[in-house]
């Protein structure tokens, strides 16, 4: 499948709640970052965890988020960042 | 509990303790059912476990790093496509994508899996207990500099810290900086400076005078 986002795009990680298995930790939900790189498409974990093939595959992106955006009291360097893998269906254009 | 006349071995590894918790017992029961049904044999399982334990940071990850330190063409290929470069060394990358994180004077990288314990097992073997601990997983994303200091790795203010949360399908290996004073060293000696912790990113490579 073709990737919806490109390196450098600003994206927001969906703030969606999901009660069942998913691979987006709560601490990044709702935060905005930049696509660091586009990775391979992978099966959707929300479905693959429950005897479903998890198709169609979703492109995975590495998203870079400023630590100061994640934690308001972050005391490290201005350039400190977190990078995390997020599936395309969890990303929105920022 | 199994009946008293149950004749199966209770553990497939001699050094395993007796299961104590519900989930340990459940795992063992599943194992016994799968063996009974002939899905796999105990010998097959033993050989699988031996294979996993045959992967160590010294024999795998450190060889990749030391090669990158002495071979700039290989290093470029490694940073560009970790999977292909690792495969070219006749090592099994183990995962569809391996991302190599290069430490520089400007950037220090450290890896965590906040959701569970994703780890580049094909290069470093089994993860250490602290990597799987809730404390490391929660704190290294929240306050990485303090956690690194606790590992004896204080990061200067002018070096950015990049935390990599390994939550999906990728695996990460930190390429630590080559220690100073090793210009004349050959690859096999350099590999001795590359520790497991330096490839997770909680430490630097060992300094030559600390060997």
Image: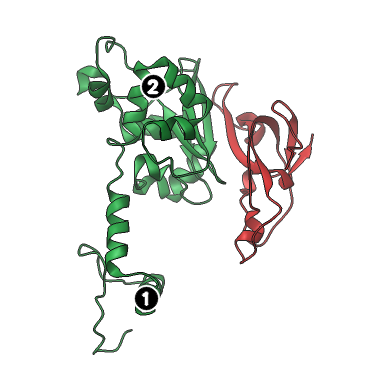
What color does chain A have in the rendering? red
Q: Which mark is residue B68?
A: 2
Residue B169: horizontal and vertical position, in percent?
Answer: 55, 45
Tell me what residue is drawn at x 64 percent, y 60 percent.
A53
Q: Is residue B20 above or below residue A30?
A: below
Q: Chain of mark 2?
A: B
Q: Residue furthest right?
A: A93
Q: Quadrant of the N terminus of chain B?
A: bottom left
Q: Chain of mark 1?
A: B
Q: Residues within 10 Å of mark 2 (few under 14, many from 20)?
A: many
Q: Nearer the viewer, residue B90 or A16?
A: B90
Among numbered discs 1 and 2, the one appearing first in the sequence: 1
**Left or right: where B192 falls relative to B68:** left
Q: Verify CB contact (< 8 Å) between mark 1 and mark 2.
A: no
Q: Can you tell which chain is drawn green?
A: B
Q: Is residue B80 above or below residue A2?
A: above
> Which label lies toward us, 1 or 2?
1
For numbered disc 2, what is the local secondary structure? helix
Q: How is the image coloured?
A: by chain
| Residue corresponding to mark 1 | B38
Q: Is residue B116 above or below residue B6?
A: above
**Left or right: where B156 falls relative to B80:** left
Tell me what residue is drawn at x 35 percent, y 75 percent.
B35
Q: Nearer the viewer, residue A69 or A15?
A: A15
């Amino acid at each position: 499948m073709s990737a919806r986002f490109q390196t450098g795009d600003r994206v927001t990680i969906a703030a969606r709640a999901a009660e069942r298995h998913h691979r987006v930790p709560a601490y990044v939900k709702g935060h905005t970052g930049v696509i660091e790189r586009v990775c391979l498409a992978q099966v959707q974990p929300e479905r693959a965890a429950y005897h479903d093939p998890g198709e169609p595959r979703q492109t995975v992106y590495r998203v870079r988020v400023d630590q100061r955006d994640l934690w308001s009291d972050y005391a490290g360097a201005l350039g400190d960042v977190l990078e995390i893998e997020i599936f395309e269906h969890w990303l929105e254009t920022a | 509990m199994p009946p008293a006349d149950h004749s199966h071995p209770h553990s497939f590894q001699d050094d395993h303790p007796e299961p104590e918790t519900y989930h340990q017992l459940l795992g063992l029961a599943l194992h016994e059912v799968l063996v009974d049904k002939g899905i796999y044999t105990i010998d097959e399982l033993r050989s699988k476990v031996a294979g996993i334990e045959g992967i160590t940071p010294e024999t795998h990850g450190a060889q990749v790093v030391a090669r990158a330190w002495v071979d700039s063409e290989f290093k470029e290929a490694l940073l560009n496509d970790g999977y292909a470069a690792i495969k070219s060394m006749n090592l099994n990358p183990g995962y569809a994508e391996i991302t190599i994180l290069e430490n520089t004077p400007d950037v220090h990288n450290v890896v965590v899996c906040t959701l569970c314990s994703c780890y580049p097992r094909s290069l470093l073997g089994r993860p250490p207990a602290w990597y799987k601990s809730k404390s490391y997983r929660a704190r290294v994303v929240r306050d990485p500099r303090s956690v690194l200091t606790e590992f004896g790795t204080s990061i200067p203010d002018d070096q950015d810290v990049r935390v990599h949360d390994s939550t999906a399908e990728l695996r990460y290996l930190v390429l630590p900086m080559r220690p100073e004073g090793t210009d004349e060293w050959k690859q096999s000696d350099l590999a001795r400076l590359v520790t497991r912790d330096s490839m997770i990113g909680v430490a630097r490579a060992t300094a030559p005078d600390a060997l």
